[in-house]
Structures are given as C-alpha cells and as structure tokens.
Image (cartoon, rainbow, N blue to C red):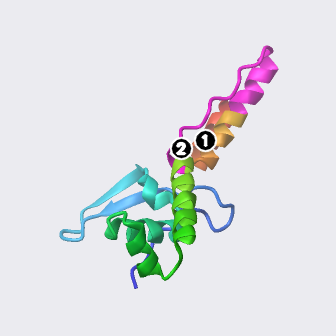
Amino acid sequence: MTKRIITQCPVCDAAMRVSELSCTHCDTRLSGAFESPPLARLPAEHQRFAETFLLCRGVIRDVERELGVSYPTVRARLDAAVAALETVTRPASPMPIMGSDASQATVARQQILHDVQAGRLSPADAAEALRKK
C-alpha cells in the first residue's frame, strides 16, 4: 500500500504544506515551503475517482464498469470532484476594503487568517504578520 501525502491538518483541518523534499537516488534533501499540486490537495476519494476517470480516458461507461456504479453515480462523483478541484484552484476573493483605519486593519487580519486557511500562508508567517498589524 502506498502512503498518501496528508493535505489537511488532523488537528485543525487547515492545509498542510510540504517542507522537505529528498532524492530517491542520492538522498539530496531540500528544505523549504513547497506548494502541493491541486490534485494532491483533493480529498482521497476525489483523487481515486480522478485517477480512475483518467485511466478510463474519460469514458463514463468504462468508469461505471470499473467502479461498479451507475451512470448517475459516476456523474455525481465527477461533479463533486470538479467542485472540489475548483475550490482548491480558485484564488481567494479579495476582502472588501472598508472606510476606517480600524476596519481596514480588521479586514487585513481576516485576509491573513483566510490565507492560512487556504494554505497560502503558514501559521508562523501569519503570526508574524499579525504581530506587525
């Protein structure tokens, strides 16, 4: 059984990030913050469906046969996988800018928290940014 990359924190459900990569041949290691590809950020069930769908070359009849489910079920799973992929690939909508300085500071804090939730900012970087506000 192949181990999957965990993409959501088991404690708070925030996005996890890859922080180290290593070469399977020479064991060279790279440390840093690496973004996971969008498909890797999908829940496991959608990843498995996408894999099956692609291996069946998008032929729904073949997906039905492979999964042992009906056409409406395949369509529902496809729609759910597409919706999940749109969620992880869609850029966050910008927060509205309000009039007062206090309101702008609140909006800026909310944007930082939103970026952490979306996985675009690490909690440590967010804490630093919030301290500066």
Residue 41 percent coordinates (x, y): 50, 58
Q: Is residue 60 left or right of residue 130?
A: left
In screen coordinates, is 23 left or right of 133? left
Do callouts 1 and 2 mark residues in contact (Cβ within 8 Å)? yes
Residues under labels 1 and 2: Cα distance? 5 Å
Amino acid type at image mark 1: Asp
Left or right: residue 15 compared with residue 65: right
Q: Position of residue 26 (x, y in %)?
A: 18, 68
**Bounds of the magenta segment:** 88-109
Secondary structure, mark 2, is loop
Residue named by callout 2: 120
Point 80% across, 22% down: residue: 103
Q: Quadrant of residue 23?
A: bottom left
Q: Is residue 10 magenta?
A: no
In the displayed structure, would residue 26 be above or below residue 87?
Answer: below
Q: Neighbour class for label 1 at 10 Å: few (<14), some, many (≥20)? A: some
Which of pointers 1 and 2 lies earlier in the amino acid sequence?
Answer: 1
User: Label 1's element?
Assistant: helix
Task: Describe residue 129's horizontal placement relative to residue 62 as left or right.
Answer: right
Residue that mark 1 sits on: 115
